[in-house]
């Protein structure tokens, strides 16, 4: 067991190191009959990939995904989907000085301490490169959820001390992808970009955060107590590299709210079902979704790879030494974390949709004569 | 599957409703040979139990634990430990008005929405009463960890807008249990208590937070990526009722720190092993423990049970109605959440200790003639 | 982790030792709205319990089950069901001679070897007493399956060299419970009983087997490859104590069949769906159910507790010694294994029903106003 | 979830269809520091691959494995090992007639019934081709176990009605791989081969069985009750395609043994530890290993792909039709099943070794300065 699995029924299993031969992800539990080809996944990988702008690492990875199994004639078959993404621009050589002298605040030492060794090229297994697998799996989850009118979006709502004002879901959809920072408030995005470039020029990096929201999530998702919606979401978001905090609803601010102010009366919605007045609880009560939007924030620390001269120790020679991490690195993480946060949110929701029985892994309704019509329209006899 | 399990190797399985007959928890994966009796567990349950002070609910539960299996002659046998805690002071009647009219911001509606029914007495399965099971299991984890010099402590570091200054681990050990608020800074504790009583008198409640810290955690714990230490801790803490945010290290504040300021040089420790200078990262790098203290904070919203008149709707009659939640309730959650947070931290750590091989579930070292000496000292022939 | 869990979605977690205070089982994943009370479970426990006849142990256990949680007003609520069965007639004293001198062919030594200790009374955790938990959980599974017209039955088809001729499912339903051997072929049952009494008188015991069959199992159950229907069934049946072989369809005999003879043509059934002509494959093709009856056999070795003088060694004293196991024991296992085999088959099927989406853990179809009608008919307002 | 995972701590996750692009397997939980390259895995794949002799399918698959991650400089790093085996000789065209007309006794119908579709080329996901993944993973398990002096071997002990006499472990090692049937009794092997060729010429196929044995398995493995050694072994073996029965120890024969004859006295072994006299129980007592050899048998039905004219129905057209399965097929399964059975046994044992703490996933003993010496000897500074 080494922590490379996520999901109870929609199960994601990954492998890969930053500068290894390839990254790989196996998705099982995807229902049959979903229209899916490599372009669907590629579109999401392209949002995450490096080298998109001046404020992302210049590593030149095409991140081209290959689907090895689980689909036929452009539709999923219900069996495991195997995907591979080759690493093309690995340059391990740069990392030689750090093999036994850990870079400050990276996973170099802890991985070596755990295993007595590590893949030292580019952070190896500890690298954020692993998230390419998550985004690939998340793209499939997203396609499934779209059929159920569930949509997820995230944007960067804080960089350093610059905070974006609250934006609507529609504003996120419209503006988040328009700028390099992925902040849905264009004016704030400009200020953030300036700030980032400032830090970048100074050979420094800066922290920030991502706001996420999910619309259309039906009420009743979550398996309290240990697998409550927030508990599983917490695991998902804290798995994202560099995360230092996760909040939903009022988050940290809830500390200062009274019960009277936070509590929300109930009214009937347009379908005469009970619904809370307002949504300070982030769409979650008792660890289960209310049917309202689920939202929250993820805090990220500044990238640890900076060209500043820093001190480390070499555990082999027993000597102190100075190092500068001069690789190809991001000056800020949230912009590229946006698709990763979305992926983890999609993966969390799709798993609960399966657990609740809203998405059915098997075709329990179909009789044999009906199989082909819906499910593999381009079967050989049709051509 | 209904979310009642926690742990990969140290496995906790629970049942119970607030006003049902009993709460129960089964612990499997506990190594054999641990000295354990009901008093060990009871001591922790007593710290969590209701009616301890003026600022906790007056429900009169003795919370007496019975161990049904898994021990012999006062030592664990390596087989599942079954524990039962009877509910003695259940008074479901009070909850009749809320059966089809959900209390504001409780899990009443979401549980009913999920299952089409719910145990409506006192919140049923959604009640914080469930945490009695966690504290019982956590008490066993704590005993195991003590043998490895790992110690966990938490205290209340914020109530409303009153924040405690940073305290040392030793101060937490010394002062946290001295006052009803469980704040390790006595002066702040007094101010918090005043504030709580003020809200209580006003028929209101207030949010707050708990700071936690673990000492002696060896380096190398955590199974990145999805089962990294922070990911599992995130799941554990977000499972705690009323949690709205979880942070570790700099937490949310990390957003505003630069890489230069946050990064920490490496030096050799007293044993000539690399160790970071400082611990802004909360004892975790790359999702794995560094060997330094692990620390963080959990934010809690205000208790939702308040005597204020609120509006709800009855989904059976289709009518609006006013309700006042007049049961026996806490005006603030963090004081009683302290042992729960500690329990979840203990459970998370002990599971990683087993996963890392530092704690061995089997007696792989013993030869038959050596069994008795350590493991069941009071076997029948000794009497 | 100590192997006390079964089921992916219908999750059974157990504890208990033969002569401990109580046996316990927690069932999670049971859908809400199932009519269930202690009598339903008790009826099955009574079929398994000791002391039913001359050919079962005379241990006097009432095996009275208490349901601590998960039901309300006689209906399940979708939350974990906790059950406890107290041990009333434990007499550990008899087992003192065996604490460090293992009984032949029992689990005494292996448990001690594993854990360095063991609960030595009556076999402790290794005792067949544990199966009381399985039968309790299986009773719930059976009730759920009955709503889907799935029925399971088993009978004793071999004792020593006496084999029963093939019987129909209806014959099993009619005759299996009529005699102490639980053989559905009355004439053979008489011969078996004679044989058993003969061995019993000679201070010996004898092996045998149980034939099982499930009717109404829908096609499409099973999650190949590692969780195929036969794979999970194999795990379930080999968990039953004293099992030495599990077969389905032609079983061991398939070794001698040619493809031509074993293969089965396809025809249309009454609903114009494809169905195989015959059922030599035991209702399973490619690891998935075909919709035909699932059937197979489980082989059991003779009970190991016999009054014969046998030789053992004492690992504490280092001496050889003679022992006679004079407790209260069954001379043959299959008769009491029948309800256990049925329970494991029910548990396996219900889990696959949930995994296939045929049984829905959540009430995704209900709108609030509809909850009460079906689900808690005796809610307080009705009284 | 679709059944593509095996192992609690040594976790195998697979994907792939018979005529898809590639097969893939991810192994997590493999300890760091194991010397491993593609040749180690390839050697086992070559034993399983098609086209080895006249009595195996002529499909021309090189089965060349590529390791994408988890190793460095020829040693494992403790992180997930991703392996891919491309399918080179897929010829789906032949399977077109069977898309909606299921082949007798294959998984064609059940897969389609489950998912409403299936990958129809060569059996798709239901094909025995999947076992290439298991053998790849098993090769890693085998290397680990070799370091602990645990060795596994299997051979074909029955084909049709021809049974091999009992052979020793050494005879299996010496003779099993010498002949095309993989029977360790050379004379019987000749007779089996004749028989197989006879059936092959007649356009038919025949059943048979595989005997397996594991030496050096330490006492104490197994997690009763549901994860007992036989229970997990049962799951593993019943996952092997075409398995109809699994037995260990006396197996089915135990039905006819009395307790007196089967029970085994205890004596002291050469190390003065208790050991049973004889091993009729197959190395397992109470579901846990005794330290003696674990052995058993797996029954296989005849291959279902035979050129005989058979009747099927087309669920799309609603018509009956005659089919002959004329692809490239094995006339008998056990010879190629031998490496698969060995793989599943290795995977089962290695998982229990990790669960028992005998194999440690982490390097809890090493101090930093000691890491390199053992674990990545060819680190860059050495070159």
Image: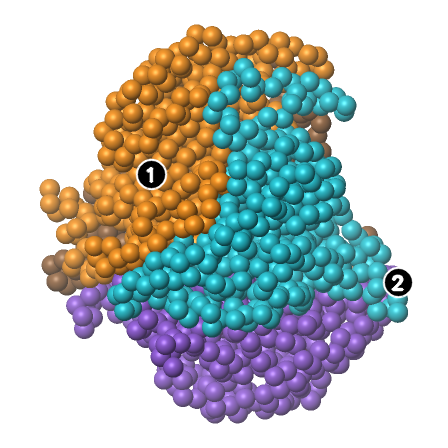
Chain colours: A purple, B brown, C orange, D cyan
Identify the residue position indicated by label 1 in the image.
C213
Q: Identify the residue at horizontal 69%, vertical 40% (top origin).
A: D186
The percent position of residue B128, horizontal first and vertical second, equals 38, 49
Is A97 above or below relative to C223?
below
> Seen in the image, is C238 located left or right of residue B104?
right
Q: Identify the residue at horizontal 31%, vertical 68% (top origin).
A: A371
Task: Specify the quadrant that holds the C terminus of chain A.
Answer: bottom left
Identify the residue position indicated by label 2 in the image.
A317
CA distance separating discs 1 and 2: 69 Å
Q: Quadrant of residue D345?
A: top right
Q: Chain of mark 2?
A: A
The percent position of residue C164, horizontal first and vertical second, equals 35, 26
Q: Specify whether disc 1 shares its chain with disc 2.
A: no
- Label at residue B270: none
> Seen in the image, is C335 located left or right of residue D264?
left
Q: Mark 1: which secondary structure?
A: strand
> Seen in the image, is B192 located left or right of residue A290?
right
């Amino acid at each position: 067991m080494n922590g490379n699995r996520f999901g109870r029924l929609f199960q994601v299993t990954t492998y890969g190191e930053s500068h290894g031969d390839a990254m790989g992800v196996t998705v099982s539990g995807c229902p049959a009959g979903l229209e899916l080809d490599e372009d669907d996944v590629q579109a999401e990988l392209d949002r995450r990939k490096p080298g998109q702008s001046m404020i992302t690492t210049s590593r030149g990875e095409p991140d081209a995904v290959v689907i090895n199994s689980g689909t036929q004639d452009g539709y999923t078959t219900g069996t495991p989907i195997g995907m591979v993404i080759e690493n093309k621009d690995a340059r391990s050589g740069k990392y030689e000085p750090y093999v036994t002298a850990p870079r400050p605040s990276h996973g170099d030492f802890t991985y070596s301490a755990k295993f007595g060794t590590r893949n030292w090229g580019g952070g190896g297994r500890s690298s954020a490169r692993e998230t390419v697998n998550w985004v690939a799996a998340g793209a499939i989850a997203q396609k499934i959820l779209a059929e159920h009118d569930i949509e997820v979006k995230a944007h960067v709502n804080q960089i350093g001390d610059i905070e974006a004002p609250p934006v609507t879901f529609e504003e996120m959809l419209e503006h988040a992808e328009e700028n390099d920072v992925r902040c849905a408030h264009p004016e704030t995005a400009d200020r953030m970009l300036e700030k980032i470039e400032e830090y970048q020029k100074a050979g420094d990096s800066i922290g920030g955060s991502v706001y996420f929201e999910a619309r259309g999530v039906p009420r009743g998702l979550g398996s309290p107590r240990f697998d409550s919606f927030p508990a599983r979401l917490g695991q998902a978001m804290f798995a994202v590299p560099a995360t230092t905090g996760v909040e939903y609803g009022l988050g940290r601010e809830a500390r200062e709210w009274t019960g009277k102010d936070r509590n929300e009366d109930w009214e009937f919605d347009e379908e005469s079902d009970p619904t809370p007045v307002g949504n300070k609880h982030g769409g979650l009560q008792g660890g289960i979704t209310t049917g309202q939007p689920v939202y929250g924030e993820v805090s990220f620390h500044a990238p640890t790879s900076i060209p500043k001269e820093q001190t480390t120790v070499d555990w082999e020679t027993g000597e102190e030494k100075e190092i500068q991490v001069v690789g190809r690195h991001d000056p800020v993480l949230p912009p590229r974390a946006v698709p990763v946060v979305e992926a983890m949110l999609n993966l969390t929701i799709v798993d609960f949709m399966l657990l609740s029985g809203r998405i059915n892994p098997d075709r329990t309704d179909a009789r044999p004569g009906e199989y082909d019509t819906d499910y593999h329209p381009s079967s050989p006899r049709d051509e």
